């Protein structure tokens, strides 16, 4: 098992890593809209989702993977009324690649953000 850490995404805010590689699979921790310097992105669901994807791309790159190798995503959203707007941003990153996905509305997320996303991806060997 290998722990993944990059300075191109916000550091973990608890006792966990940004991601873990096991065999040829990468498992990310949930990414929230924190910039690499720890600044929280304000604004609506779109602005926050763009930052989440910037973080996901950074940890995937560090792991030797990319969004095109993502097999499964889990999306945690604070308000399901933001679902369509979140989907528009999400689709702009995945295009024709459509990994399996679960989306769950939750009562509260770390730092009271609007969205958190985690991924499982294949790693190049």
Image (cartoon, rainbow, N blue to C red):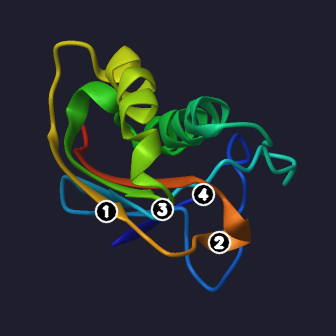
Check if mark 3's residue and mark 4's residue have beta carbons within 8 Å.
Answer: no
Secondary structure of the residue carrying tag 3 is loop
The earlier-in-sequence mark between 2 and 3 is 3
Q: CA–CA distance between discs 1 and 2? A: 15 Å
3D distance between C-alphas at marks 1 and 4 = 26 Å
SS class of the residue under badge 1?
strand
Secondary structure state at the residue bearing disc 4:
loop
* Residue 66 left/right relative to 44: left
Give the quadrant of the N terminus: bottom left
Q: Nearer the viewer, residue 46 or 19?
A: 46
Residue at which label 1 appears:
104
Crowding at mark 2 (Cα within 10 Å: few <14, some 14-19, many 20+): few
Residue 3 % position (x, y): 48, 67
Q: Residue visible at 25% across and 25% down?
A: 68
Instruction: Identify the residue position indicated by label 3 in the image.
Output: 30
Q: Which residue is mark 2?
A: 110
Query: Tag 4 or tag 2, which sits nearer the N-term?
Result: 4
Q: Which residue is mark 4?
A: 5
């Amino acid at each position: 098992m290998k722990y993944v850490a990059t300075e191109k995404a916000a550091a973990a805010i608890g006792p966990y890593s940004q991601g873990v590689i096991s065999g040829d699979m990468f498992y990310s921790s949930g990414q929230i809209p924190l910039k690499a310097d720890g600044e929280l992105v304000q604004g609506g669901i779109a602005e926050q989702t763009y930052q989440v994807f910037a973080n996901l791309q950074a940890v995937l790159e560090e792991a030797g993977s990319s969004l095109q190798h993502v097999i499964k995503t889990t999306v945690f959203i604070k308000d399901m009324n933001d679902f369509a707007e979140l989907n528009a941003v999400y689709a702009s990153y995945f295009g024709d690649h459509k990994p399996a996905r679960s989306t769950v509305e939750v009562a509260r997320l770390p730092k009271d953000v609007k969205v958190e996303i985690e991924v499982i991806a294949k790693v190049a060997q």
